Image (cartoon, rainbow, N blue to C red):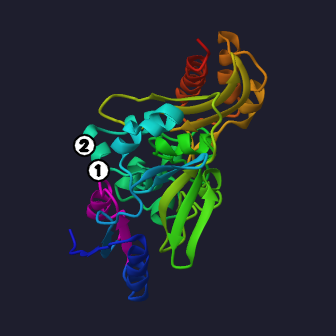
Amino acid sequence: MKTLTNIDAGSIREAVQAAQQAREGGQAFAFSGGGSDLLQQIKDGTDQADVVINLRNVQDARSIVSSGADISIGGLVTLTELAEDPLIVSGLAAIAQSAASVGTPQIRNVGTLAGNVTQRPWCWYYRNGFDCFKAGGDQCFSVNGENGQHAIFGGGPSYIVHPSDVAPALVAFNALFQVSGPDGDREVSAEDFFVLPITNPERENSLAEGELLTGVRIPSVSANTVSTYHKIMDRQAWTHAEVGVASVIQRDGNQVQSASVVLAGVAPIPWRVQAVEDFLAGKQISEAVAREAGEMAVEDAQPLANNGHKIPMTAAAIETAILSLAAG
């Protein structure tokens, strides 16, 4: 493993400045919040960083606060904190549940919101040194290779799946992502933050070089909002979602006024199922409605040779998630 330069930033601004200095010096850099995945990537060669900018002493992105009707969550809030915070548990259950579903207690204790949302893919080919699209190559080896865990929506030319559990829940709540970089601060919708491989096969998000995700803001959530995150895993040893469903519903009794349904584990980005959202509006939640929603969600699925099992699994997961939000 090569020798790395470690820089301990005291603030987000210091971290951005350190990244800029490394860049001007011709050095590759990486930001590290929890660092649960970064060092492994450097060891494996999937991250070429010369300089690691350590954010563990940064305090200006570690809070969860209610500001008016909005809720702001710092990018360095740990997944454990996110899963257990009373404000999140009571009003944004899908976010708390998604954070609680990640990895092991040890990973959740150090892993951060920003780290989970911006983590790189766990495709076997990418993680094992193949010269694929994600590594700057010109092909996706999964197309004709091992693809049981790969995308059934939104694939091409790369068929990775986005590994974050928390990101779909944030998209479902129409979160706004706060980004800091050398050109200042900006805010982008969670949905627009993620990038399909057809747009950029090397990247999963819209962060420019030197930028980092510093927090998210959840706009006002009405009192009649209920939500859940339902996750299916291949086995307990593999903690990433085979299929995940973040569902947010505003309801009057058992009638859906509006709905957000966003999938994990099936696409290169958190996958919003607009047709299901439109279908649910005005419907009474019932087994028949939930089943039809699940079937509708997978009508456009395009499985590879070995991941067709994700189609019925996705339909069933959506059905389960919607039924769990029925009144009473």
Name the image quarter holding the N terminus: bottom left
Q: Is residue 182 above or below residue 101?
A: below
Q: Position of residue 216 (x, y in %)?
A: 53, 54
Residue 253 appears in the rendering? yes
Range shown magenta: 28-48
**What residue lies at 69% left-to-right and 24% top-to-bottom?**
251
**What residue lies at 36% left-to-right and 62% top-to-bottom?**
46
Q: Position of residue 70 (x, y in %)?
A: 59, 48
Q: Is 19 covered by the magenta stretch?
A: no
The label shown at residue 106 is 2
- Determine the image quadrant of residue 240: top left
Camera-side residue of 205 and 56: 56
Q: Are marks 2 and 1 in contact (CB under 8 Å)?
A: yes
Q: Is residue 52 above or below residue 73?
A: below
| CA distance for labels 2 and 1 | 7 Å
- What residue sits right under mark 1 in the picture? 110
Residue type at mark 2: give it. Gln
Q: Rate crowding at label 1 as few (under 14), some (14 to 19) or many (20 or more) other CA atoms within 10 Å.
A: many
Q: Is residue 267 above or below residue 233?
A: below
Residue 241 appears in the rendering? no
On the picture, is 190 further left or further right than 283?
A: left
